[in-house]
Structure formats: structure tokens, C-alpha cells
Image: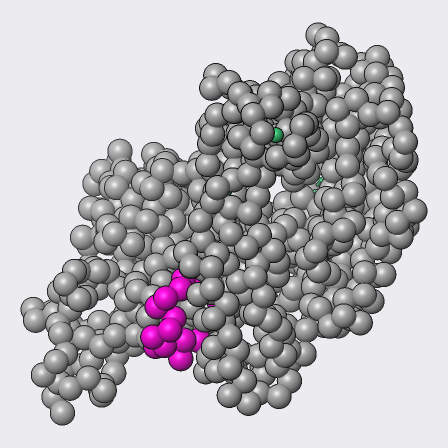
Amino acid sequence: MTAEPIVRIAVPSPLYRHFDYLPPADHQGTIEPGVRVSVPFGRTRVNGMVLALATATDVPRGRLRRADKVLDDTPLLSEDVFAMLRWAANYYHHPPGEVFAAALPVLLRQGAPARVTHDHWRLTAAGRAVGPQALSSAPRQAAVLERLHQSPEGIAATTLRELPGDVPAALRGLRQRGLVESAPVPAGVARGSGDEPGMPPTLTEAQQHAVDSIVQAVDRFQPFLLDGVTGSGKTEVYLRVIEQVLARGRQALVLVPEIGLTPQLAQRMARRFDVPMAMLHSGLTDRARLDAWVQAREGHARIVIGTRSAVFTSLPEPGVIVIDEEHDPSFKQQEGFRYSARDLAVWRARTLGIPVILGSATPALESLHNAREGRYQRLVLEHRTGTAVLPRTGLLDVRRVPLAEGLSPALLAAIDKHLQAGDQALLFLNRRGFAPTLRCHDCGWMAQCERCDARLTVHQGGRRGTRLLCHHCGAVRGVPADCPACNSTDLATLGHGTERVEQLLAERFPGIGIARVDRDTTSRRGSLQQLMDDIHSHRKRLLIGTQMLAKGHHFPGVTLVGIVDADHGLFGADFRAGERMAQLITQVAGRAGRAARPGEVLIQTHHPEHPMLTTLLRDGYHAFAHAHMEERRQAHWPPFSHLALVRAEATGADAPMTFLESVRELAASFNSPGVDLLGPVPASMERRQGRYRAQLLLQSAQRKTLHALLAHLVPALADDKRARKVRWSVDVDPQEVL
Ligand code: ADP
Ligand code: ZN
Ligand code: ZN
């Protein structure tokens, strides 16, 4: 044995293991877990994360390679995030190197220093009045203070870091004493103004109870399910809790489902709190993302708001985690490292011993179940605040009714009535484009994607004119002049999407201003904001859109919500289809009548007696959830069982099924009673982007049993030659099992 330690590293690679290296030849001092190192890997160099130091290795000493360079002086990740990622690699059965890479901003992954280049610090008025001798008990803070006294205009953080000791910690200490502040604001971080006009509203009794319960738990782990209808004041509860957390010198982490909601919530917070806030979402430049990340890591940003991956942000002084719209499927990553940000947030809060708030008007059945079992404390906000009342809801039976582009005369009359009254109306249709199908009237031919088992959607809008688009692989094609099968020129569109309904509305309601909100109209940066501005200023009074309209946006002027087609969700093949439909309808309905005027919700259906719809409309989301929960229990679906899905795809039609048959055999050979193996079966859309897809579902009443099996199975697959013929992946707690 030699005295030289062995450095155990998570290297970004699809392998389910760590790699051992020797320290760089010239390295002085110790190497801590959590620092990045650059290492030779195969014939390239990569940046990995030190997991641990060891004294022994399976690799013969002579074959151990040396790391090139240690990239960080101190661990990059806070201890809890480091622990969370190690846990997550196990739980999601994903290669550890890829897990760590996924958790870091791109620039850090590429080896950039974890520093904000334009981050300056300067003395506050209080700081200018205090000499370093006042801090004799904190010599490092005194040294930093003294240095800042020499440069009243402020000093770059990078320069300050040249002082000895843990400078970020010293700066944190000084900031807590109110003696220093960070000066020019780096990208990705905005300073709140705290200039909200007037006093915050007096809390309702239910809000007050919620705030008190959560604040009481600031020093321990407690998950709260904040279960309140839209407009019941959930956000106000978050704000009050965050206020308390900030007052205690702690930071708040707030997760939202989509990028479009980040600025909205951030603005509300900025008006309330005079503190620096970091915003983390996929729309940032790499530089801004790194800045925001570092500002959070060093404790400068006091509030961090972001989408899914913000759950990986290190915080030195965490006080609370909020997950807004916790039911939203976008909290689950759907490719690569398939984590659930909501579930990781709860794990993290437990490790940190802090409260976590899951807020929603339509909680996921899993969360309701957790509340029932006593794992989460449920806090209910039953009523809308102020004078706002919940909208009246009605079903429109459209059987045998003549429809104009999918809209019934009753719905059109209702739109007219609300517009006449000067209000706004919103139509929800979860299908973008002009029409979902192009069909030959003579022979029945339909335009299909060549690479997917899917029909092409007709799109008319935009400068490019009419074309056919595949929503699954992005393929674009021109519209044929005649039928490729029979040469007939009688080709006609079938069905209707948002573009088509928009056209009809423009004809019927000229001069009203129509806002179409879907992926096609909001793909350019800033275009969603422009549409929202037009809606809020009433330049546009008629809204038509997809599920983007259902997510958290407030439309105070909307008094009518029309749901063009509720029937999709009634017969969806996935076990979550019903839950999703109920959430979507309830969320869209919640957009109506938030101000003092009562709202109206009209739902078109061909199945007005369907029990899912009638329960939802008559008794509300929770009654629906209750009934649906029983169905889940009887069918052994989550939350009454635990799932993992092994997916495989390949260019050959047979390879995925053949591979999954062998996975099934292998899984069966581990002899795990209590884990059911369902399948393999071809995916419901078997061919996508030219690849055939299949899946094998593993189901168990016991999470432990399932994971014990996966812990054997997944590494064995990684080493299996047969696995090289396909692209395979494991999805733990999948959102969809189609
Ligand atoms: P949610 O997040 O549940 O949709 P919000 O917190 O956004 O609800 O509140 C809805 C509206 O009611 C907002 O305009 C908010 O300012 C206002 N509001 C919240 N709490 C109160 C209260 N206690 N009294 C009066 N207005 C309130
Ligand atoms: Zn034809
Ligand atoms: Zn396609």
C-alpha cells in the first residue's frame, strides 16, 4: 500500500459505476468529495465529480490513471445536494456520472470556474460606520471588511477570494450583519424592489392557519399539501412563509412547472421583497444560468425561483422549499436522468430538516394519498378570496348538434353574450394546428408520417403557408395536390385544431382581437409575454389555446371558459388519463371569474352521462379524486403500487421485443416474489422517428422489493451484450405507461 489516496470519481458516461484515479501528480493538499476533477477517460478528457477517497481499489495499481487537474478548491455542491444526487442515482437506477452532470449548469459541466465574473461587493452605510476592530471575534470577516474599506466603489468577488480563508462564508457573515451588499446585479439575478403599493392583504382565517402551521415547522422536516382552489390565496401563503424565512436569515427555493410562470411569480415576489432573487429556467443563457446558480450557492440570492432542475441548486441557508402546481407532470424529467423534482424536493427537505410546501388546486392522487396516510399535513383553502366566487359549470351535450368547426351554437351564443358585456372569453382545445388529419374523400387515404405511427397535422399559419407536420418527430412536408393512392384531387381536412377555430372566431367576432396561445404562437422568445400583455390590456378579448392556458396564468377579465372537447380524457389508455382530464378541466375552469364578476364554464361533450364528468362537475375535483382513488386501488395502480418501466427502441422491428423478452427472463431469474412483470408489449405508438419501441412494466406493492430487483437487473443489463442492439432506459415512477 502506498500513502497516496485513491480518488473515486463519477465520470459522465452511461456506465453504472464510478472510476478510480490517482490524484494529479502536482496536487498539494487534500481532495474533498464534491469537487470537480478533469480526468483522462478512454481517449478523451472529461470532467467528473469526486465521490469519495479510498485506500483500496479493484484496479491493479499499475493500471490506475492519474487525474489531470482538480477544478474546485472547495466542494461545488452543498452537502445535502451531494447526498441527494448520490441517493437519486440509486433510486432512479441511473449512471452516477450522468446524474451529477445533469445537476450542473452547462458551463460548470464544461469545467468553467464556479464564479460570477461581474459580482461585486461593497460596504453598506452601516458597514462604512464600522471599523474592522469591531469584528475582532471574527478575524476573516474583519479582514474582508478592512479590504472593502480601502475600495469604497466595491471589489470584484474574484479579487476578494484571494484573501485567505473561506471568503464566501465571511461575506455571508458580513451580509447577515448588514455591513456589506453585493453590487451590480449579474445576469439571471434581479434585486427585488419591495415597492408593492399598499399593505399586503389581511389573511383569511384559513390562510392564517396555513401560514402559522408552516412557520411553526421552520426548524423541522414537514411536508405540507396546500390544497386550495385557484384564487384561494395559495401564493399569498407562500409569500408570508417566505417573509418569515427571510427574516430568519434563510433562503427560499420555489419550483414552478414551466418557464412562462417564472417571471410572473418572480414579479410578485420582487414587489414584496427587497432582496436579490435568482431565476433558473431553460430560457436563460448559459452564462446567466451559471451566475444565478453561483449567487444561490454563495447565499447572495435569497429567493431562488426555477423550473424542474432548480431543485439541484445548492443553498447555504435553506429555510423552505415550495412546489407550486405540484400535480404538474412537467416536474418529471422525461428523458435521460428521469427524476421527479417534486419527489426529490421532499427528500431534500427531509435531509435538511425544513418544511416543504406542495401547492395545488388539483393535487396529484399520490399527494392526496400521502396526506391521507399522514405523511403530508393537508392545509385546505376552500374559498376564493374576497368577493370572487367559483364559476358556474355546465355541460353542453353536442350529440346531433350541428357544429361549426367544433363549436356548438350554444357555446357561440355564450361567447357572444360575454363579449357584448365587455368581458373576455377563453376557449380551450388541446390540439394545435389547423386540422389533425388530411384525408382523400375518394379512397380514404390519410396523410401519415413516414417515420411514426401517426397522422400528419395540417398547419396553415405562418409565412411558410400550408404544410403537413408530424407532432411526434417534427417532420415537415408539403400538402400533395392529389391523392398519392388514387390521384383524386378531392383531399379534405378532417377535425379541427386551434388555428381552424381561430379562423372561425375571427369571422364570427370581427374586431374583437383574438389571442391564440399554443406552442406555434409562443415559440419565439418574448412572444408569450406579448400575448399575455395583449390579453391583460384587453387589446385581445377572445383567447383560444392549448394546455398552456391551463397553467397558472391569471386572466382577471375572463368570465367565460369554453372547453371544446372533454371526451379525449374519458377514454385515454393511460391509467392517469382520467386524473389528467380532471386536473385540466378544473385548472382551465379556474381561469374564469377571478375578479368580482361571476364566471361561467361550458364543457362540450358527446358523453354527458359519463360518471367521471358528472362527478367532477357536480361534486368537484376532490370527489372525483376520491372515486378515482378507489379504481386505482382495485386495479393496483399507483399510489397503491410502485412502477418502473424498461423501455427499448431500435431501427429493426423485432429487436426491442426480443431484448425485453430477455430482460423479462433475467428479471424472473432473480426470483423476486411480489414484483409482477407485465409485458413486454409494443408501445402504443410503436414506431416513432423511424424507431420501433416496446416496453416492460415492473409493478410491486412494495417499493423496497421493486428496487431490490432493479438494483440487480439494471447493472446486469448494462453489461449485457444483447443490450447493445437496442437503446434502452429505465423509468422509475413513470408518468405514462403507454
Ligand atoms: P392562488 O395562488 O391560490 O391562485 P393568489 O394568492 O394568487 O391565489 O390570490 C388570488 C388573488 O387574491 C390575488 O390577487 C391576491 O392578491 C388576492 N388575495 C390573496 N389573499 C387575499 C386576502 N387574504 N384578502 C384579499 N385578497 C387576497
Ligand atoms: Zn385517394
Ligand atoms: Zn413523425
Q: Is residue 695 above or below residue 545?
A: below
Q: Residue furthest bottom?
A: 1
Residue 157 in the image, given as x and y percentages of width and height = 26, 46
Q: Is residue 628 above or below residue 602?
A: below
Q: Residue furthest top?
A: 511
Q: Is residue 269 visible?
A: no
38 relative to 654 in the view: left or right: left
Q: Residue at x 48, y 56 (%)?
A: 692
**The image quarter in which residue 150 lies:** top left
Residue 132 in the image, given as x and y percentages of width and height = 28, 51
Q: Is residue 119 above or below residue 66?
A: above
42 relative to 629 in the view: left or right: left
**In which quadrant will I find the N terminus?**
bottom left
728 in magenta:
yes
Q: Is residue 120 above or below residue 99?
A: above
610 in magenta:
no
In the image, which residues are magenta?
Answer: 714-730
Q: Residue furthest left?
A: 26
Q: Is residue 676 or residue 374 the one in the foreground?
A: 676
Quarter for ligand 2?
Answer: top right
464 relative to 97 in the view: left or right: right
Q: Residue at x 83, y 67 (%)?
A: 630
Q: Residue at x 56, y 33 (%)?
A: 485
Numbered label tally: 0
Residue 172 in the image, given as x and y percentages of width and height = 38, 53
Q: Is residue 63 visible?
A: yes
Q: Residue at x 51, y 52 (%)?
A: 687
**In which quadrant will I find the C terminus?**
bottom right
Q: Is residue 183 or residue 723 the one in the foreground?
A: 723
What is the basis of the colouring in this image? one colour
Residue 212 in the image, given as x and y percentages of width and height = 72, 57
